[in-house]
Image (spheres, rainbow, N blue to C red):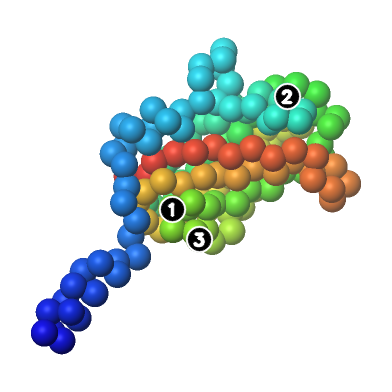
Amino acid sequence: MKKLFLVLLLATACARPDYITREEWLRENTPPASGSCTLNFPQTQLCVKAEWLTGPNSSEANVLVITLDGDSSVYDEMSALLWMPSMGHGSAPVQITRLSATQFKISNVYFIMPGDWEVRLTLKRSGQTVDQAALGLMVP
């Protein structure tokens, strides 16, 4: 009886949550098409165009280029955090290179496992947060 209880306990104690299918997740988390914007920062109304140069995948380093349309005087810095909402953890810090006043290259993007991820973007001005947005994606 103890062995049966232990087996049942181990079978139900898996840390992996129930996932919906990739198609369902994409349907629920893909922003509506609004021109060429991938998403918008809600406070500043800046349009975000995200282009993957490599990836997204969990088997190698990925590179993402972010281009912002709108008034670039509202921010002087951008930061990015990789976060896996279903597991409650993130990944190693990324490297951000400013390519122009409105374009940033995010490299060393490592998705440490397949699943649902967010690239959380923060715009700052003089060290203070101005706006935040999250790019949701399903990483194979």
Label 2 and label 3: CA atoms lie apart by 28 Å
Instruction: Tell me residue 79's x, y (percent).
Output: 69, 48
Check disc 3 and report its element: helix, strand or loop. strand
Q: Nearer the viewer, residue 61 or 2?
A: 2
Determine the image quadrant of residue 25.
top left
- Amino acid at the residue labelled 1: Ser
Q: Nearer the viewer, residue 17 or 91?
A: 17
Does label 2 or label 1 sit earlier along the sequence? 2
Relative placement, left or right, of 40 versus 2 is right
Instruction: Tell me residue 66's x, y (percent).
Output: 61, 34
- Amino acid at the residue labelled 2: Gln
Query: In this view, which residue lies farthest toward the bottom?
Result: 2
Of circles 1 and 3, the one toward us is 1
Check disc 1 and report its element: helix, strand or loop. loop
Look at 84% across and 32% down and name the residue there: 74
Q: Is residue 54 above or below residue 17?
A: above
| Residue at mark 2 | 45
Instruction: Tell me residue 107's x, y (percent).
Output: 55, 48
Relative placement, left or right, of 118 versus 48 is left
Q: Is residue 98 visible?
A: no
Quadrant the N terminus occupies? bottom left
| Residue at mark 1 | 86
- Amino acid at the residue labelled 3: His
| Residue at mark 3 | 89
Instruction: Tell me residue 35's x, y (percent).
Output: 57, 13
